[in-house]
């Protein structure tokens, strides 16, 4: 039986970076470039298979990030066949989808005074673009909500994506947040820890954060806190292999409290350490800790 391309040749990595116009695709590609990836923006989707063959011949094309957006046209119907052809060449393309709230996208277009690629009013264009990209979004290996991200934070997230441990085949992101600032759009699993005692109401702890020893000591001393952490960690350890089995490469676990300063930060930090000690590749991010 003839060997497949995947069996005979060592292939590089292909990331397909796509998403909503104004959500930060160009900035994401710059981050990939900083990490040594060969980046091409708006390569026609139909040329992906031919480009993949070039990658096998050119050593400098080992790791590539390809940017695709709505300017490619209504490419959704051809996207599946293009992915299949890349897989046939022995690659495992990963799709990164950049998203943001409608309000954030409108503001960014207003600030830059750029015209939306669909050539309509911003609100109409956003609605149509979401509909067109909905199919690709469902196939994304990772959705990144850039609404409140700074460039450095986006680069930190992408850095984590590129350090996936083959042993676990999954990159975990543990994010703390405050419910009064809204849910993270890219969260896969959300845990509400507002049932824990709130250090905010202790005068000497109010200005501290969940990363401070005083907050850790306070919560560790409260009934049920350590027990909850142990039980929740065991639950995650039970379901994470099932996510991996289903082909999930990236998973975001969001831990929320009221303001995102104390309880969620403490739990997220402790949880990240436990998962890291268990051999998973983990990045830790506290979204609202400075608010």
Image (spheres, rainbow, N blue to C red):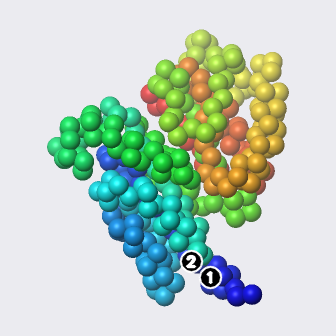
- Look at mark 2 in the image and give the residue it sits on: 89
Q: Check whether the beta carbons of the residues at disc 1 and disc 2 lie within 8 A of each other.
A: yes
Q: Nearer the viewer, residue 187 or 51?
A: 51
Count of numbered labels shown in the rendering: 2
Label located before the other in sequence (1 or 2):
1
Q: Secondary structure at mark 2?
A: loop
Q: Is residue 208 above or below residue 70?
A: above
Q: Residue furthest front?
A: 77
Give percent across and percent down for residue 207. Answer: 53, 22
Q: Secondary structure at mark 1?
A: helix
Q: Is residue 90 above or below residue 141?
A: below
Picture residue at 48% right of the left edge, 88% below the top: 57
The disc label shown at residue 245, or none = none
Q: Nearer the viewer, residue 247 or 212?
A: 247
Give percent across and percent down for residue 174. Answer: 62, 41
Q: Nearer the viewer, residue 70 or 63?
A: 70
Give percent across and percent down for residue 81. Answer: 50, 65
- Look at mark 1 in the image and give the residue it sits on: 5
In whole angstroms, how far apart are the C-alphas of marks 1 and 2?
6 Å
Q: Is residue 10 left or right of residue 102?
A: right
Give percent across and percent down for residue 98. Answer: 43, 48
Q: Dot 1 surroundings within 10 Å: few (below 14), some, or many (20 or more)? A: some
Residue 153, visible in the rendered structure: no
Picture residue at 64% right of the left edge, 24% below the top: 192
Q: Nearer the viewer, residue 77 or 89?
A: 77
Q: Is residue 99 left or right of residue 11?
A: left
In the rendered view of the protein, which quadrant contains the N terminus?
bottom right
Q: Is residue 195 above or below residue 19?
A: above
Residue 44, visible in the rendered structure: yes
Picture residue at 82% right of the left edge, 27% below the top: 227
Picture residue at 49% right of the left edge, 20% below the top: 180
């Amino acid at each position: 039986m003839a060997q497949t391309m995947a069996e005979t040749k060592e292939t590089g990595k292909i990331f397909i970076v796509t998403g909503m116009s104004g959500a930060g695709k160009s900035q994401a590609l710059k981050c990939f470039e900083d990490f040594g990836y060969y980046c091409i923006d708006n390569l026609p989707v139909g040329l992906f298979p031919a480009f993949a063959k070039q990658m096998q011949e050119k050593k400098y094309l080992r790791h590539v990030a390809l940017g695709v957006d709505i300017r490619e046209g209504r490419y959704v119907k051809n996207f599946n066949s293009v992915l299949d052809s890349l897989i046939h060449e022995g690659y495992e393309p990963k799709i990164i989808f950049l998203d943001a709230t409608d309000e954030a996208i409108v503001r960014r277009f207003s600030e830059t005074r750029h015209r939306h690629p669909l050539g309509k009013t911003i609100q109409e264009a956003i609605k149509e673009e979401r509909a067109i990209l909905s199919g690709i979004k469902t196939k994304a290996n990772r959705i990144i909500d850039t609404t409140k991200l700074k460039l450095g934070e986006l680069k930190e997230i992408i850095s984590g994506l590129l350090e996936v441990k083959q042993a676990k085949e999954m990159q975990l992101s543990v994010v703390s947040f405050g419910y009064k600032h809204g849910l993270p759009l890219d969260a896969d699993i959300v845990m509400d820890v507002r049932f824990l005692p709130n250090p905010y109401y202790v005068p000497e702890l109010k200005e501290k954060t969940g990363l401070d020893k005083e907050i850790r000591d306070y919560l560790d001393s409260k009934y049920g806190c350590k027990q909850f952490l142990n039980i929740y960690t065991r639950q995650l350890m039970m379901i994470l292999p099932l996510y991996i089995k289903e082909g999930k490469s990236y998973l975001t676990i969001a831990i929320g409290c009221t303001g995102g300063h104390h309880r969620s930060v403490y739990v997220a930090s402790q949880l990240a350490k436990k998962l890291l000690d268990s051999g998973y590749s983990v990045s830790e991010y506290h979204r609202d800790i400075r608010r």
